[in-house]
Each structure stands twice: as C-alpha cells, then as structure tokens.
Image (tube, rainbow, N blue to C red):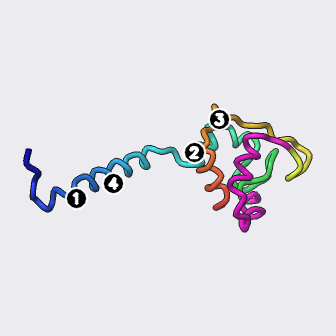
Amino acid sequence: MRHSTNPALKWLPGILLAALSAAGTANAAAPDVIATKAGCIACHTPKKKLVGPSYHDIAVKYHADAKAPAALAAKVRSGGAGNWGKVKMLPIDSKKITDADLAAVVAWILKQ
C-alpha cells in the first residue's frame, strides 16, 4: 500500500483531532448548569448568601490560595461545618457530580 505524498493530507489527523476536541468541548455542560443539576443552588447563589456562602464570597476568601481547588472539592465530598458558620454542608457524592464536573465547578466558582 502506498502512502499519499500529498502535503495537505499530512495535516488531516491533526485537523480531525482538533475538530473532535472542539465537538467534545461544545457538548460539555457549563459549570453553572452542572452546579444547578447537582443541587448546589439549594444552598448557594452567585452573589448572595443563602444557606451557605455565595460563590462570590467563596472566590474572595480563597482567591490567593493555590490549594483551594483541591480543598474545596474535598469539602464538597466530605461535607462539614465551621468555615462559614455553624450550618453543616451535606456531603455530595460522585453520583450527583463527577470528579471532573466538580473540578470544573470549583474552578468556575473561584473565578466569580
């Protein structure tokens, strides 16, 4: 079998990979939609304290903390109280929000 010597065809695999990556990104849900589906809005809102702190307040508190993404994801998984008052945050398991989606939501919250 002869390989094509057409120089335009050598770029085809890269173009196909880029197109598939873009399609996967386009189909991924936005972090705010993921947070809503996971039930985060039952206790949190973008700008105002509800049961728990607002996303904005979380971002302000942790903006300079390089360990914040991992710590906040762990807090979501384990739940607990004490960081924002006495109201306990319930743990959220991976059936409600996957680890990848949780990482995207935490990154989005920290940008608020």
Q: Secondary structure at mark 3?
A: loop
Give me the residue at 22% from left, 58% from top: 11
First along the sequence among labels 3 and 1: 1
Which circle, 4 or 1, is nearer the viewer? 1
Q: Secondary structure at mark 4?
A: helix
Q: Secondary structure at mark 1?
A: helix
Which contiguous range is marked in magenta? 57-80
Distance, label 3 to label 1, CA atoms, is 39 Å
Q: Are marks 4 and 2 in contact (CB under 8 Å)?
A: no
Residue 108 versus residue 95: which sits nearer the camera?
A: 95
Distance, label 1 to label 2, CA atoms, is 31 Å
Q: Residues within 10 Å of mark 3 (few under 14, many from 20)?
A: few
Q: Residues within 10 Å of mark 4 (few under 14, many from 20)?
A: few
What is the chief secondary structure element of the magenta stretch?
helix
Q: Which mark is residue 18?
A: 4
Q: Which mark is residue 71?
A: none
Rendering coords of residue 7 (x, y %) = 13, 62
